[in-house]
């Protein structure tokens, strides 16, 4: 094996791993690693707020009558805030955080293409969050995260205007971040890395950024009209003065359906990384996975009106059924490719891997529900019922959030130099996996039975199933604190790791943990195949990495890590 | 794929694949048997077709579910790293044939589902002969239904949707305020009401009985309370018995304004039930002030505060709700129009007088607390 040489590039000069202080994260910085962590910490804060609102929703729905919320309006405000926070202040910025931290590292770059713009995009988020929450003080928005007029224009209180302004800021943040990713990925790949040698996470971020740049301006335009209708007396959406309520629905969903892929595609990218590294095997069908991200991005622009199957002119429903069915195909390719990735591997059941496997197992349920919803006649029955609530939580919680958790366990050592506790991680996974299933799967049945969504009071026939859902939801809520405790504990006393604790081939592992300022000393050379596991060249490369960045001396015996083979 | 790696010398990979797929199909068919358990009672011709379609999708979806979960569990067991095994998996990057297969098969499946869905859609939305037209109005947070009676130039209003078995219905629906959605789970139909448009939905009930009607589109604070009922009579004769009674009441309205007020309110012509509670009429809304005992409360607290006799207070608060807000309640009540018969919130003065006269009897003693003559005089200024 000694005959194989593994060029690493760069300089072997050892730079002590930096120990960033908390104060560095509280002020303006143009370092993509600090910005990435700022995104993640902010998002986690809003995840806790959104989760607390979800607990209030489930508490209200324990009984058929209105008992927790003071009024239907207050319930609607809680529900509106839950959806808006989870989408715009948790999943989307959390994915942006992973992208910011990882994309330059995976490209062997020193930073993003536009560091100042990167910081600016992040600093739009805190004021947007404050604006959104400030709505509580002047009468919170009560029209749901979809905010259909005329409820949102003629009836919802002034918090609705703040809601729209907040989303305006978040939209601008999203567009700026996306431009930055596209330019970074286009221009800053290292020597020897063509598009077809990029890690699949980078492919996924590229597809996501393209959607964000093309779709988000429609949200911005729609929000502008909504604000004008509310404050300037226009009537773009008010039929009593010549406006049209369907105009909003079309514009809103032209953004918000692609937004579903903004939320899930980066997660798909993380799944590809985690599944390959922890099963010690190449991804199966690299090009198919990369191209299916692009196919989803493209077809994702043609399916928006399936959210309008009960309001759209009946003759227009069929074309959108066809496109919505088609998008199942590239999604299926990904699922089968990931199964193929496991096949023949040496699977290590780390917490990161468990969450990615749990994602595969739960996401497929969301996918099957999605195909059922694409069929117009079935959709008509379950539209705006708990079936839909169940479907999008399977996709967004079972999909995006499971993968965020997976990514946290996988890259936390890179970000902090310490590993998240594996025992707590596994406990977190199993509690989350089962309580998630029993929270959301029964909602399919409640919806099929006819229970509409967004109601504070319901027909008593739905009482038992709602009790089950609420109790499971409370467990799911508590499970989150296992993760939060693990993060705090591991930051303080977690096991120290070296540059490459999982022995990954992508370039973020080819520097110290945490990486030094400007990431790499000199220009690193990427390994020829980011997923070339199982070859002698890969072993030689990983061994060379270990020699340049020696792991800390006393490795815990319990660590589920492979020592270098052949030693 | 399964067989490629796991077959032993004694068995052929083709047999393994056939056996696995036979198991998956069997599993899908068993899962699909759950269809009637997860769906509510089904009572329409359209529902029959939708349920069959759902059953097919559940069978296919169930098989795919088993395929993926089975693949996961199998891989987790078969390909787990054994204790102390520090090696990598096999260096395998893909298999174009296999990838083509798992692109083509889902494509064929969704094509098939699209075609059968399209067929069902065309069938359930096509116009039927002898459709009965029922108008529906969804106003925050109340449903009301109306039937034209052209021979008497009358409209029968009802808060309950009446129809009968095997009579095709076409609903013509309007909303004066926000989006609503007309949803009858038992019929498997749903259609949004959009301000500024008339939207339609068709269905044919097939099983007699009473079923809930919901609003499925968020419409504000009372959204969850926005429920009604559909009564499917077993035959035309029982339907007409109800219908002719309603027509008869309209042709011979009670002389007594209190009795007429009871009749106007219970017909559901106005959306009061969506927000107010009034036990005598079965109203349960909580968005607006409770109307039980309203006559006593007006006499005891409002007359002194406003200097208006109870009939004036009630009449003016009916036509100008924004000026008479009860503390703790917002200005959500529709602004009824006494003079413009084309307005969506038209309420003729006769109806207002009848409603007020009826509300004046909502006292503990059941006595009328108002001066009905003065009420007529006050009302004349609106004409």
Image (cartoon, coloured by chain):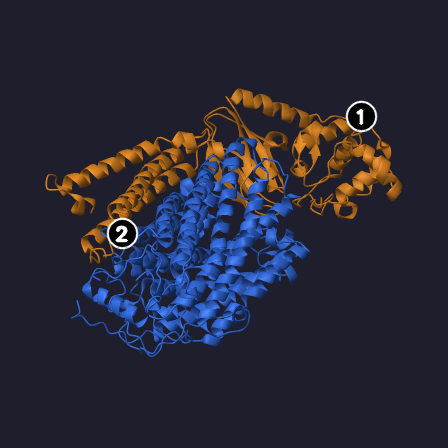
Chain colours: A blue, B orange
Q: Secondary structure at mark 2?
A: helix
Residue sitting farthest toward the front:
A554
> Which numbered marker is on residue A510?
none
Q: Please tell me which residue is depicted at 58% across the width and 59% down the height of the picture.
A: A236
Report whether residue A335 is seen: yes
Q: Secondary structure at mark 1?
A: loop
Q: Is residue B72 above or below residue B246?
A: below
Q: Is residue A250 above or below residue B15?
A: below
Q: Please tell me which residue is depicted at 38% across the width and 31% down the height of the picture.
A: B34
Left or right placement of residue A123 versus residue A379 in this view: right
Please name whichever residue, A29 or A381, is drawn nearer the observer in this view of the structure: A29
Residue B293 image position (x, y, % from top left) = 78, 31
Distance from Cα at disc 2 to Cα at disc 1: 77 Å
Residue matched to label 2: A342
Quadrant in the picture for the C terminus of chain A:
bottom left
Residue matched to label 1: B366
Report whether residue B218 is seen: no
Report the number of discs: 2
Please name whichever residue, A307 or A545, is drawn nearer the observer in this view of the structure: A545
Residue sitting farthest toward the left:
B9
* Chain identifier of the residue bearing label 1 in the image: B
Q: Residue A448 is drawn in which quadrant?
A: top left
Residue A50 image position (x, y, % from top left) = 54, 52
Quadrant in the picture for the N terminus of chain A:
bottom left
* Chain identifier of the residue bearing label 2 in the image: A
């Amino acid at each position: 094996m000694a005959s194989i040489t593994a060029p690493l590039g760069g300089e072997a000069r050892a730079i002590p791993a930096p120990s960033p202080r908390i104060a560095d994260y509280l002020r303006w910085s143009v370092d993509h690693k600090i910005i990435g962590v700022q995104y993640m910490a902010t998002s986690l804060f809003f995840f806790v707020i959104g989760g607390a609102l979800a607990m209030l929703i489930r508490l209200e729905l324990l009984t058929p009558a209105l008992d927790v919320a003071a009024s239907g309006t207050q319930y609607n405000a809680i529900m509106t805030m839950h959806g808006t926070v989870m989408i715009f202040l948790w999943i989307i910025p959390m994915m942006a955080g992973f992208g910011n931290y990882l994309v330059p590292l995976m490209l062997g770059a020193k930073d993003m293409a536009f560091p100042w713009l990167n910081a600016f995009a992040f600093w739009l988020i805190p004021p947007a969050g404050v604006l959104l929450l400030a709505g509580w003080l002047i009468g919170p928005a009560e029209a749901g995260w979809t905010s259909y007029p005329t409820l949102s224009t003629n009836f919802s209180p002034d918090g609705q205007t703040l809601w729209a302004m907040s989303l305006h800021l978040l939209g601008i943040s999203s567009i700026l971040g996306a431009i930055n990713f596209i330019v970074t990925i286009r221009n800053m790949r290292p020597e020897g890395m063509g598009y077809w040698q990029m890690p699949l996470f980078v492919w996924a971020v590229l597809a996501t950024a393209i959607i964000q740049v093309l779709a988000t301006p429609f949200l911005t335009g729609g929000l502008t009209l909504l604000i004008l209708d509310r404050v300037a007396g226009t009537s773009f959406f008010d039929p009593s003065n010549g406006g049209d309520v369907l105009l909003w629905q079309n514009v809103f969903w032209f953004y918000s359906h692609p937004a579903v892929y903004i939320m899930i595609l980066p997660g798909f990218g993380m799944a590809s990384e985690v599944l390959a590294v922890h099963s010690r095997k190449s991804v199966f069908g690299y090009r198919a996975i990369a191209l299916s991200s692009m196919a989803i991005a493209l077809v994702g622009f043609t399916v928006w009106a399936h959210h309008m199957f009960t309001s759209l002119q009946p003759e227009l429903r069929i074309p959108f059924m066809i496109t919505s069915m088609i998008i199942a195909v590239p999604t299926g390719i990904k699922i089968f490719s990931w199964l193929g990735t496991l096949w023949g591997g040496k699977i290590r059941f780390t917490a990161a891997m468990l969450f990615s496997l749990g994602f595969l197992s739960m996401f497929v349920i969301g996918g099957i529900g999605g195909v059922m919803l694409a069929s117009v006649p079935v959709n008509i029955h379950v539209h705006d019922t708990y079936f839909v609530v169940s479907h999008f939580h399977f996709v967004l919680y079972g999909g995006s959030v499971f993968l965020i958790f997976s990514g946290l366990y996988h890259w936390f050592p890179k970000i902090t130099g310490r590993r998240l506790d594996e025992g707590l991680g596994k406990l977190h996974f199993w509690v989350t996996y089962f309580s998630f299933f029993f929270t959301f799967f029964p909602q399919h049945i409640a919806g099929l039975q006819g229970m509409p969504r967004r109601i504070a009071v319901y027909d008593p026939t739905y009482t038992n199933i709602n009790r089950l859902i609420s109790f499971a939801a409370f467990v799911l809520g508590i499970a989150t604190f296992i993760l939060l405790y693990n993060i705090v504990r591991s930051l303080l006393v977690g096991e120290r790791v070296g540059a490459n604790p999982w022995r990954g081939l992508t370039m973020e592992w080819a520097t110290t943990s945490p990486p030094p300022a400007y990431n790499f000393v000199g220009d690193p050379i990427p390994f020829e195949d980011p997923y070339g596991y199982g070859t002698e060249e890969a072993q030689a490369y990983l061994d060379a990495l270990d020699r340049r960045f020696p792991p800390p001396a006393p490795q815990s015996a319990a660590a589920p890590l492979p020592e270098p083979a052949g030693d | 794929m399964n067989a490629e790696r796991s077959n032993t010398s004694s068995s052929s990979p083709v047999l393994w694949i056939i056996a696995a797929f036979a198991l998956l199909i069997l599993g899908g068919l068993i899962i699909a048997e759950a269809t009637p358990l997860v769906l509510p009672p089904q009572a329409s011709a359209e529902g029959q077709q939708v349920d069959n379609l759902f059953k097919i999708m559940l069978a296919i979806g169930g098989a795919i579910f088993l395929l993926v979960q089975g693949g996961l569990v199998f891989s987790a067991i078969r390909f787990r790293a054994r204790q102390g095994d520090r090696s990598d998996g096999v260096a395998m990057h893909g298999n174009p044939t296999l990838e083509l297969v798992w692109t083509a098969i889902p494509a064929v499946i969704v094509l098939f589902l699209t075609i059968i869905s399209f067929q069902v859609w065309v069938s359930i939305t096509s116009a039927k002969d002898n459709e009965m037209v029922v108008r529906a109005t969804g106003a925050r947070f109340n449903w009301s239904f109306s039937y034209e009676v052209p021979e008497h130039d009358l409209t029968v209003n009802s808060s309950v949707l009446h129809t009968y078995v095997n009579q095709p219905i076409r609903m013509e629906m309007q909303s004066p305020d926000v989006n609503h959605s007309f949803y009858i789970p038992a019929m498997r139909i749903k259609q949004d009401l959009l301000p500024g448009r008339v939207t339609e939905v068709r269905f044919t009930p097939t099983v007699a009985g009473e079923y809930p009607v919901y609003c499925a589109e968020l419409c504000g604070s009372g959204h969850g309370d926005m429920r009604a009922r559909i009564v499917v009579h077993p035959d035309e004769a029982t339907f007409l018995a109800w219908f002719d009674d309603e027509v008869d009441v309209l042709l011979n309205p009670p002389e007594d304004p209190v009795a007429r007020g009871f009749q106007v309110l219970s017909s559901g012509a106005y959306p009061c039930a969506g927000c107010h509670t009034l036990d005598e009429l079965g109203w349960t809304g909580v968005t607006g002030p409770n109307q039980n005992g309203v006559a006593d409360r007006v006499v005891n607290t409002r007359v002194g505060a406003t200097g208006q006799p109870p009939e004036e207070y009630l009449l003016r608060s009916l036509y100008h709700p924004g000026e008479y807000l009860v503390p703790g309640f917002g200005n959500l009540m529709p602004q009824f129009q006494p003079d413009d018969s084309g307005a969506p919130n038209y309420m003729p003065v006769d109806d207002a007088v009848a409603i007020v006269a009826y509300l004046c009897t909502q006292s503990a003693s059941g006595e009328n607390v108002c001066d009905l003559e003065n009420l007529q005089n006050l009302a004349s200024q609106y004409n």
